[in-house]
Amino acid sequence: MTARKKNLCLRCCYAALACTLTLGTACAHETSDPFSNRLPERYACGEINTDRALDLAGVVHNVLCNNPQTREVWANSRAQAAQTGVSQASYLPAISATGTGTQNTPGVTQRTLGLTLSYLLYDFGARAANLDNARQLLASLNASRDSTVQTVFLSAVLAYYQAQAARAAQDAAAAAERAAQESFALANARYLAGSATPADMLTAQTAYSQSTLNRITAIGAMKIARGNLASLLGLDAHVNILLSEARPSLPVQDTGYAELEQNITAMIEEARHNRPDLKAAEATLRAAEAAADAARAAGKPTVSLNASGNQSSSAGINTHGSSLGVSMNVPLFSGYAPTYRIRAAEAQIDSKKAQLERLRLQVALDVWTACQNLITATRNLHATADLVGSAEQSERMALGRYRAGTGIMLDVLNAQNSLYSANQQRIQAEFNWNISRATLAQAMGNLNEGVNPGDDAIYNTIKHEK
């Protein structure tokens, strides 16, 4: 190649580099996303209308919108997505420009402009390993985000049913107080008429006072439950949250839930396939393996393409210079640091494998425990229904006998206490049943913001329930 052609080639290279620099500068805007790594923004969340009653779906939606945990994990995912773009940038050339200008006495002006390009051609897989590591960490964070969403989802369901149970407990305590007041009024009337002993009247009065204390305690518990729900919604605890009336418990068959044990193996495998925390652990293991590959490649040679061009002007004299070449960097000795980095990376792989196996066992335990809790809660739900029915009949019978003059006040009070206790157990059984269903859905990895959180639909993802 002649000197003229070589000079023309270098000038074309210089012009191409200048054009690339101009385009790159224009594209290097903070909102640009040349590698398409930007995650979609979280769905828009409006302010909570505290004048409208919220159902379970509304509570879950607003909690997922406003809870700081969901915002935090979403921001972590966006940060790692940007870090993945940093790793992808290593596949593009690096271009830099320099410029200097000086004014010397007596009036000599010097200006220098330069442009340099460096492009890594081959590095024995270090770039690929680092990019794979970044992508696996992104997959891990995305899975961890889904796991956090499920946790917050379950917290919302728990807070909703806790508030509903507290309200039902307050209603039951108020009903028990009214019954105790009626019994006290009846005993007092009979005492004044001379057909009852002072002991009957005082016993009834004591029971009435105790029922009043129970009602006051129930009101306090309801307010605390409402405060917990408000805090979960991102509101101050004193903000009053209106809740829609809870529907009666769904009719369930004990035998249907008992079939869960027969499908437990399939359910565990499905949970291991769906659980986002297990997916996060698997992605973390793959990221550790990629980091080990990067550590092994870090101590190997690299081959790069280098090009530069400069123009200078001094005292009216212009000069041009350019260069184009290939360079190789061969690490010879780094104080055994690469060896220990590789050992550390391999130890991290063993640690991640152990964590993954521990989590696999935990998934099986979670599914098994959730199944047993659901079966127990279902049986308790049926048992408490029978308990409330018999307690109501006993209370009516004891009160009727006392009114007829054939019974004693102690029997009436015992029957009323039994009815109040049965109602409390019924409320707790319904709460446990609803929470057990949600817990099983979470253990299966099916409780997330893509599920319609209605009283029926929230649990339709439990495929082996029927």
Image (cartoon, grey):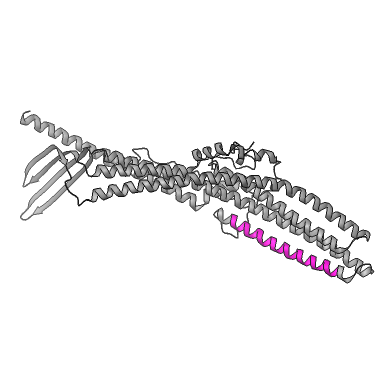
Identified at 58% across, 47% down, the residue is 369
- Residue 442 visible (yes or no): no
Q: Is residue 21 left or right of residue 451?
A: left
Q: Position of residue 327 (x, y in %)?
A: 15, 39
Asked which quadrant contains residue 225, the reply is bottom right
Q: Nearer the viewer, residue 310 or 175?
A: 175
Taking the magenta stretch, the answer to whether it contains residue 208 is: yes
Q: Residue furthest bottom?
A: 198
Vertical relation: 213 (above or below) 72? below
Start-end of magenta stretch: 201-229
Query: Does residue 402 belong to the magenta stretch?
Result: no
The image quadrant where one finds the N terminus is top left
Q: Position of residue 83 (x, y in %)?
A: 34, 45
**Image-based side of 263 in relation to 288, left or right:** right
Secondary structure mostly taken by the magenta-highlighted segment of the chain:
helix
Q: Is residue 99 left or right of residue 198?
A: left
Residue at left offset 7%, top offset 53%: 107
* Extreme residue toward the top, this view: 1
Percent position of residue 386, x then y = 77, 48
Quarter of the image that includes the C terminus: top right
